[in-house]
Image: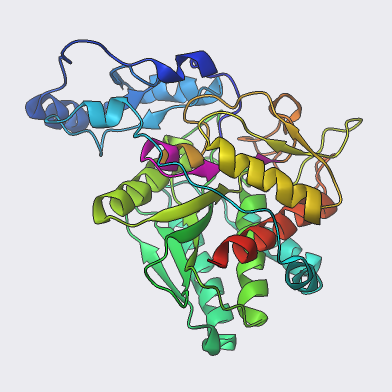
Amino acid sequence: MKVFNSLLTLTTLSVLISGCLAGITEAELRQKSANGLRLISLQEGVEPEWKTFDEVSELIKEDTGFFDVTEFYDPSNPAAIINSRRIIPATYDAPSRISEVKALFDAISVENMQQYSSNLTSFFNRHYQSPTGAAASVWIRDTVQDFINAYPESGATVSLFNNTYVQSSIIANIPGTSPYEPIIVLGGHMDSINRGDRTAAAPSPGADDDGSGTGNLLEIFRVLVSTRFKPTRTVEFHWYAAEEAGLLGSQAVARKYRTDGVQVKAMLQLDMTAYTKPGTEEVVGLIPDFVDSSLTDFVGSLVDEYLNIPWITSNPCGYGCSDHASWFREGYPSAFPFESALRDSNPFIHTVNDTVDLEGFSWSHSVEFTKLGVAFAVELGAA
């Protein structure tokens, strides 16, 4: 995740390019990408720029949010990359499945979450171009498959979503009884990076960013299939590759869903859920930008109803700061509950010190986000 040093503010969200776009030709796209340059989008409504490896590394060091659109830019339709699609308004009812949701909380296991974290951080890194990053994807897929094998009556499935680099995203599916209803998506990224050396050769444990959200998703999925959860709407779980490299994994998935005409009722992003700055109040920080306001309000109502901590409206996250932005860009409603206000977030992400031993890392805090994800799936999984 990139934490609030973006070039974009809320007021620039509505900016559109006027007149004709010069665009980038197909020949330029092929030649420059073949030479190792990456096409980087830094602002809504502004054409992307070519950047070298070192220039992209500086963006990561400075925690500047961006989309790497090299693989997705269409010279015949540059506006499709430059401007987000308009989100079709959706409504969300107040929480109503109180007893059903709270009964599921008893199935949440902190010990399981700790084991997921231990396994994830045992990889030298989860870099999207490294062998261990690829192996981490397979481990997540295999772990989810083990849950499915233990509870085959769920009808759940899991598969790898292959990319142009070695790391795959992972998509798990709990089928709904009404297959034509818009689906529910819970997502987070499974890769990690070291901002001091963003090559595939640098260690990056990524316990909080985003081992915490990855573990939340694993435990939410396990709880639901083990308790015979039968949604009306299909509920999907996504673990995205290459978020740290410009949201590459989530862009690919969200773009494919839009191209394929998949309808999505709501997308919840879990990215960093385990840290509370010492001396500050334990809260859920609701990110206010590049999200759907109605869905964010609904997530706040889930916090009020089901969690033991309050929510606050965080300071803005900025452009391209996490995978929710890929869904927003494709016109899907997304929400992003965060471990704190952005200004109080974990200062050790993207370093070798992003471990569970860090002061402020809290399993009980992360469990609140597991509860939130369970509530989100159950409340919205009912049509």
Q: Position of residue 215 (x, y in %)?
A: 65, 59
Task: Specify how the rendered protein is coloured.
Answer: rainbow
Along the viewing direction, whichever of 181 and 243 lies nearer the viewer: 181
157 magenta-colored: no
Identify the residue at image location x=35%, y=24%: 41
Magenta span: 327-338
Identify the residue at image location x=14%, y=29%: 75
**In the rendered image, which quarter is residue 89 located in?**
top left
Identify the residue at image location x=65%, y=35%: 349
Along the viewing direction, whichever of 171 and 351 lies nearer the viewer: 171
Along the viewing direction, whichever of 188 and 205 lies nearer the viewer: 188
Compared across the picture, whether 169 is left or right of 105 comes to left
Instruction: Kindly tell me whether residue 37 is visible in this rendering.
Output: yes
The N terminus appears in which quarter of the rendering? top right
Instruction: Kindly tell me whether residue 122 is visible in this rendering.
Output: no
User: With respect to residue 75, does 219 lie above or below?
Assistant: below
Q: Position of residue 155 (x, y in %)?
A: 48, 83
335 magenta-colored: yes
Compared across the picture, whether 331 is left or right of 382 comes to left
Q: Residue furthest left?
A: 27
Q: Residue furthest top?
A: 19
User: With respect to residue 202, does 145 lie above or below?
Assistant: below
Along the viewing direction, whichever of 358 and 255 lies nearer the viewer: 255
**In the rendered image, which quarter is residue 19 located in?**
top left
User: With respect to residue 374, does 94 lie above or below?
Assistant: above
Q: Position of residue 42 (x, y in %)?
A: 40, 20
Compared across the picture, whether 20 is left or right of 46 comes to left
Compared across the picture, whether 308 is left or right of 124 comes to right
**In the rendered image, which quarter is residue 381 located in?**
bottom right
Q: Position of residue 359 (x, y in %)?
A: 85, 39
